[in-house]
Image (cartoon, rainbow, N blue to C red):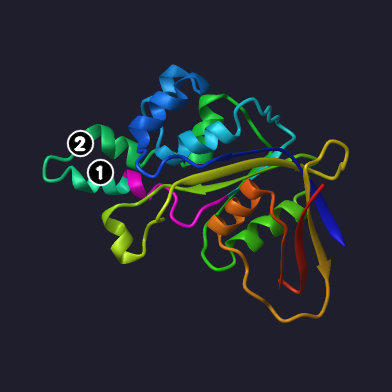
Amino acid sequence: MTERFLHQLRLELPAPDECAAGARVRLADKFPRTALRRMTHLGLLIGSTLDGVTLGPEDALVFASTFAETRALEDYLGSFPAASPLLFQTSIHPGSAQQVLIGRQQPIARLWPLAGRTRLVEQALLSVLIEPAVRVALVGGEERGTWMLEHRMASTRAFAFGAILTRESAGAVGRIAFAPAASIDTACPTLEQFAQALAERRALAWQGAGGAWTLAWL
């Protein structure tokens, strides 16, 4: 069995009507003022979950999102035909996790950005388990879409989570474990379902990638 333990778990579950402008007001004291103006909604939410977390050059970060900065792209396209230069810059800005690391000047050993749908959570956790760094930050989330929802190219809600995973159980709040075994894949939780389970401190179990996965609370 391979396992990692959850430390410093934080979540962002903003109000359904919150946008990037509202998040900037609510979370302004958590970011350098020079970086705040161009941060996306997801960048602000991810940054909030990592507030007070010190990442160093020996640490790694795994980032998971299905739609990433969809809302930023929506806002830019919505500014046509008089395209907004500021919204253009935001739409092509580094991704949410990079926004946080750059703004806080936190160099790390490796960044693993992952995108997917049905088995994204499994892919992210597998990346955490095989990452050689002693400390791995696992972050993920989505921005809430508007008109792209009808095309199934955006999330129906905004959320984010962040945690540090290590091999040390002392002080941990939970554990992610994978046990290799002959098995038939079962439904993997979606990123939103995984975030909700973290928020509720609810156990999860499923099969995939040639074994059994468990999320347990200590």
Q: Amino acid at mark 1?
A: Tyr
Q: Amino acid at mark 2?
A: Ser
Classify residue 122 as left or right of residue 129.
Answer: left
Residue drawn where x is 64% and y is 61% of the image = 123
For the record, the magenta segment spans 64-72
The spot of residue 83 in percent (x, y) is 17, 40
The spot of residue 130 in percent (x, y) is 77, 55
Q: Is residue 172 above or below residue 36?
A: below
- Tag shown at residue 151: none
On-image quarter of the N terminus: bottom right
Mark 1 Cα within 10 Å, few/some/many (few <14, many 20+)? Answer: many
Whichever of callouts 2 and 1 sits on the residue coming sooner in the sequence is 1
| Residue 86 magenta-highlighted | no
The spot of residue 152 in percent (x, y) is 36, 65
Residue tagged by mark 1?
76
Residue drawn where x is 29% and y is 52% of the image = 146
Is disc 2 in contact with disc 1, using a CB cutoff of under 8 Å? Answer: yes
Residue tagged by mark 2?
84
